[in-house]
Image (cartoon, helix red, strand yellow):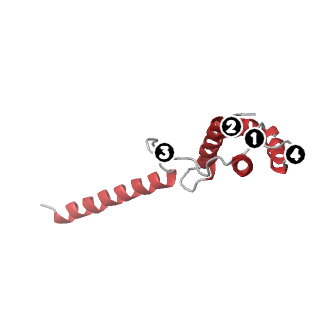
Amino acid sequence: MPSANTQRDQVVAAMESVALVLDEDSPLPESAADVEDLAQRLRGHISRLGAVVPPGAASLRGAQQLASVGVPEGYMPSRVHLVKLAEVTQELVATVQAQGGAPAKATRRSWCWRRPRINGVRGSIVAVAFAFLVLAALVVRAGP
């Protein structure tokens, strides 16, 4: 049986990985490699948390079944599979917390740089381009 500190560390690490997928501020992974990396990470958490959860727990069986399936091909199916993995990992964390009193929320690392969402970047580029267009029109109108 893992110690309480080890169990707490596993729960915090799992919640950080779940947050990468389920948080509103987290962008969807852009490449298939990113999806595979996150899926592998979540599978590892499911495996480690499975040692702490009671063997007959329904959440454990479902999580292990989902973790044993590979990431499907295609943009949407792979992202849906990733979200499902994150949700079952979150259920396992809740089960561990219910039995052992591990912390309820993972701490966010404030020093991490977040990649801006692609639509935010595109919007910024359009706004700057529009500003230059307006500026150019004003300069042409003012003329010599």
Residue beneath the point at 57% across and 56% down: 24
Describe the element under mark 3 as helix, strand or loop. Answer: loop
Q: Outermost residue, left direction?
A: 144
Q: Position of residue 62 (x, y in %)?
A: 83, 47
Residue at mark 1 to residue at mark 2: CA–CA distance: 7 Å
Amino acid tagged 3 = Arg
Q: Which residue is mark 2?
A: 36
Front in this rendered view, residue 92 or 31: 92
Quadrant of residue 14 within the rendered picture: top right
Residue beneath the point at 36% across and 56% down: 129
Describe the element under mark 2 as helix, strand or loop. Answer: helix
Describe the element under mark 1 as helix, strand or loop. Answer: loop
Mark 3 neighbour density, 10 Å: few (under 14) some (14–19) many (20 or more):
few
Which label was assigned to residue 71?
A: 1
Mark 4 neighbour density, 10 Å: few (under 14) some (14–19) many (20 or more):
few
Amino acid tagged 2 = Glu
